[in-house]
Image: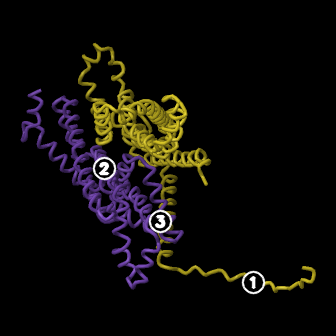
Chain colours: A yellow, B purple
Amino acid sequence: MSDTTVQIVEARNPPPEAIRKWTLPRIVGTALCGVWIVLGVGLAWSLYSAFDPDVFFKYIPKMAEGLIITIKLVVSSIVLGGLLAIPMAFARMSKSEFVRACAFGYVYFFRGTPILGQMFLMYYGAGQFVDQLQSLGLWWFFKDAYNCVLLTFVLNTTAYQAEIYKTAIESIPRGQREAAESMGLKKGVTFWKVIFPQAMITALRPLGNEIILMVKASAVASLVTVFDLMGATKLAFSRTFDFNVYIWAAIIYFTMVEGLRRTWDWLEKRLTRHLVR
Amino acid sequence: MMDLITQLAWGPGGWGDELAAGTLLTVSLALATLPFGLAIGLLIAVAKTSGEKSLQTAANIYTTIFRGLPELLTLLIVYYGGQIILQRIVALFTDAYVEVNGFVAGMVALGLVFSAFSSEVFASAFKGIPVGQPEAAQALGMTRWQAFRLVTLPQLIRLSIGGLSNLWLILLKETSLVSVIALNDLLRNTNVAVGSTKQPLFFYSVALLIYLVLSLVSAKGLGAVEAHVKRGEQRTA
């Protein structure tokens, strides 16, 4: 390698940048983006021009209170529903045919009917049995619309979450359980240390979707006199006929859902980073 | 119990015919929404999977917005907002009072939401079809439209039928929201019956049972359709 001659290569210009032609998809796409921009600007302008400080300062605090109720409602129903969903998931996979059928009926009922109807049944149905509930000492609970809604949401999300956990647990290969058993692990240890952590990773995505569905579904609570975010918005609209309150509510709900979705994506990426090859 | 059953009688004495009419409206609203939701969803999915950045952005904005709003809020915005916009347009010509049709408002709102979700289903189905297939079809001399209709579309249906079935079941349940804009669907007619008979437990149970039957029947029907479009997937041993 001692007599290597050095070759001098003349520097070449980089190839010219490809010219992006104005194809039909590009024209349509640009036009549609333009439509979105016009709509966005129009919306911002109408919010600004029709801004009524009286309405704003009177009803924004009410909507903030409503937002807190919405968050309370969603968080408590997701958590309580999650706690009930694990036994329900086991009931769905039970060896006893009777238990399995009961759990299936429960899940099918709550997933097959509108949550709005379930809520009406709970709220107005309870009102029909004031005397009986009073004698049972339960009336204080059903008297409050918030509690009726919470109970409906918990029962509803239990059904959905049970289905999520069932699918997740079943997705763990049987060999894992057998391997744990052959190593002498007890059943409880096998479940909590081997099956459950892996199942939860599978359940992560559908669980995130369920939370988002719950945030959106929680708006129906406003139809039985609960002043959640939607309820406060409807109250403001019925008093002021200022359509902008609906736009504010839309922005708040949208921020919540989109924020939740992005957080969940990040969480999922972080929790599954050991699985990425 | 017997007198409760007689409440369900047909005609002016009972509520059977009202509930049936409500069920009919619920089903027709869902069926009327479906073709729009599917067509717009498919168009948006085509935009999302096209190579054009600006088209993708426009499509993604659509999906993000209508996936991120509560359906009830979308419905109220379409209903009241549509009323305001329509009134302004009409005011340019005459001073007549126009009212937004509840059925149309419901159809638009549910269609917006349905198309946002169905576009996601279609987009992931598109990704399941190798690019080589439409390319090969064109290499064989088919036009782009022929390649789409004869090669891509049949596989697209097969890949998306499961997701679309779920969306249909969701749509069927979401139609109950139109009861808040005074449209006489199943749930609203039930509300009316409850208001006059003071039997909420009975009537809401009946209504939920009807919804359950609708879900059950459509799940069965869609299952059969799915089996039919997937018949080619069965492998012989």
Q: Chain of mark 1?
A: A
| Residue A13, numbered label | 1
Q: Residue at x 53, y 36 (%)?
A: A194
Percent from the top left, x then y, of residue A24? Answer: 47, 78
Residue B190 % position (x, y): 20, 38
Instruction: Tell me the subunit letter for badge 2.
Output: B
* Name of the residue lying farthest toward the front: A182
Q: Which mark is residue B73?
A: none
Q: Position of residue B86 (x, y in %)?
A: 33, 59
- Determine whether, in the image, residue B170 is placed left or right of residue B51: left
* Label 1–label 2 contact, CB within 8 A: no
To the question of a shared chain for discs 1 and 2, the answer is no
Q: CA distance from mark 1 to mark 3?
A: 36 Å
Q: Amino acid at mark 1?
A: Asn
Secondary-structure class at tag 3? helix
The residue to which callout 3 is attached is B48
* Kind of residue sitting beneath label 2: Leu
Residue at left offset 82%, top offset 85%: A9
Labels 1 and 3 positioned on one and the same chain: no
The spot of residue A44 in percent (x, y) is 51, 55
- Rendered image quadrant of residue A238: top left
Where is B98 relative to A267, above or below? below
Which labelled disc corresponds to residue B169? 2
Measure the C-alpha gap from mark 2 to mark 3. Answer: 25 Å
Of residues A242 and A81, which is closer to you in this image? A81
User: Which amino acid, by three-letter code, is at mark 3?
Assistant: Lys
- Is residue A239 visible in the rendered image? The answer is no
Q: Chain of mark 3?
A: B
Q: Is residue A181 visible?
A: yes
